[in-house]
Image (tube, grey):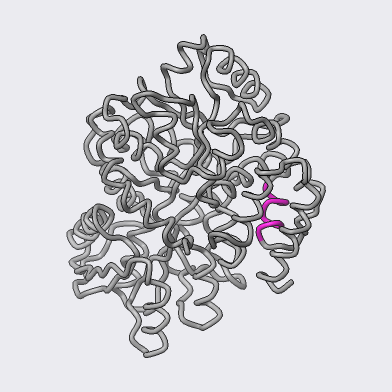
Amino acid sequence: MQTRDQRRALGVLTTAAVLTLSACGSSSTSSSSPAGGGTPQAIGGNVSVWAVWSGTEQKDFQAVLADFNTKTGVTGQFQSKGDQLPTVLGTAIAGGAPPDVAILPQPGLLHDLVKKNALKPIDSVVGDILTSQYAPVWKNLATDSGKTYGVYFKTANKSTVWYNVKSFTDAGITKPPATFDQLLTDMSTLQQSGVTPFAMCGGSGWTLTDWFENVYLRVAGVDKYNQLAAHTIPWTDPTVTTTFQTLSKIFGTDANMVGGKAGAVSTPFPDCVSQAFGSTPKAAMLYEADFVAGVIPTVNSGLAAGTGFNFFPFPSINGSPAAVSAGGDVAVMLKDTPQSEALMKYLASPDAGSIWAHLGGFTSPNKQVNQSVYPDDISRAAAKALVDAGNNAVFDMSDQAPAAFGGTAGSGEWADLQNWVRNTSDIAGTEAKLEADAVAAYGH
């Protein structure tokens, strides 16, 4: 059974490929962007840190910890716990031996740990930095019962539509669409040129949740999005109906997708990437998060970032403002020591974000991270879109849901959306099934 943790593992596998983009972008060096919260104090000692990161992500984070050590004299003792982090962390907390700091892959885990009185509030440590250098959404996501418990350090832009530049050029499309109506027009143009508009990755159910969330955000707005994420409005709400009607303009027609509806729900991620960006592409576009930039070179090393492939922000619907669905990792403090406080303050600063941003495969939500530090134009543009979205940035809805609803293959939202793609005319039935599954998972 695939879970959202395995979805994160995919990001680990593709991060190394993201680094190949650096040859296609600028040659800027690490940023000397201003540090937040004043000059760090050299205090020495150790701080233990647990996260899911391994491989390239672990190596890059250790570069961040090395700079932290230079600035404070504190040695960061990092342990990768992989997909078992929630379980291992829970065991450590129960045994009275948690790490000083943990970096969590989803907001639900933060709130679970707050309920267990396992986390220390950090308003007095980083509150000023979060207020001045981050959009309010990031502090709100890490707040529970009026207290702040986390710093969103590593984020991802999940509102990126990737396109094959040659397919667009051959069809006579000179610029990517900014509106959903223009997207539909361009899809018709692509079909007339002999190219299927979209490769779909619906064999991996989580990609369909991402499609739904991006359209819902633009149809219903941020407030409704957050209400549906918390299940304080039902999946039978009229805004859900409008979202499915909008999605039907793409998913309702076989010719819009490689392999039609059957292909759309049988092709998993990342197999779908080769359909749009392989040596003999069948499609012109593919929607998924910014990590697609790291997968494309693995299926076609001849495609250069910018000239061979590129992305455009998920289009506006009926004049909706620029908005971003995001994922991210949040740092939390389990032991209140001078060293752990120093690390939390450092992770909130632009200095920490700038180091990893320059290495690639990383987006910082800190507004003071200079965008010139990103290694290529594509990652720079994805980061800019996320930061510029401000309060129109929301967190991945399915990652906020109980795993039984938003994170399990073959059941809950994943299965319900796959079944809808097979029969897009049954919107009412799909909504009823989603609502029943949500009630069972949320308990309300």
- The x, y position of residue 2, in whole percent, is 47, 61
> For residue 359, what is the image quadrant?
top left
User: From the viewer's perspective, is 243 left or right of 305?
Assistant: right
User: From the viewer's perspective, is 27 left or right of 113?
Assistant: left
Image position of 428 with respect to 183: above or below? below
- The x, y position of residue 304, in whole percent, is 30, 25
Q: Of helix, strand and loop, which mostly describes the magenta segment?
A: helix
**Viewer-proximal residue among 90 and 103:** 90
Figure label count: 0
- Is residue 161 a member of the stretch shown in magenta? no
> For residue 69, what is the image quadrant?
bottom left
Going 67% across and 62% down the picture, which residue do you hit? 230
Going 56% across and 66% down the picture, which residue do you hit? 403
Image position of 274 with respect to 176: above or below? below
- The x, y position of residue 441, in whole percent, is 66, 70
Going 56% across and 42% down the picture, which residue do you hit? 324
User: From the viewer's perspective, is 269 left or right of 359?
Assistant: right
User: From the viewer's perspective, is 192 left or right of 371?
Assistant: right
**From this viewpoint, is residue 322 visible?**
yes
> For residue 246, what is the image quadrant?
top right
Image position of 175 with respect to 220: above or below? above
- Is residue 226 a member of the stretch shown in magenta? yes
Q: Which residues are magenta?
A: 222-229
Going 65% across and 40% down the picture, which residue do you hit? 215
- The x, y position of residue 357, in whole percent, is 32, 44
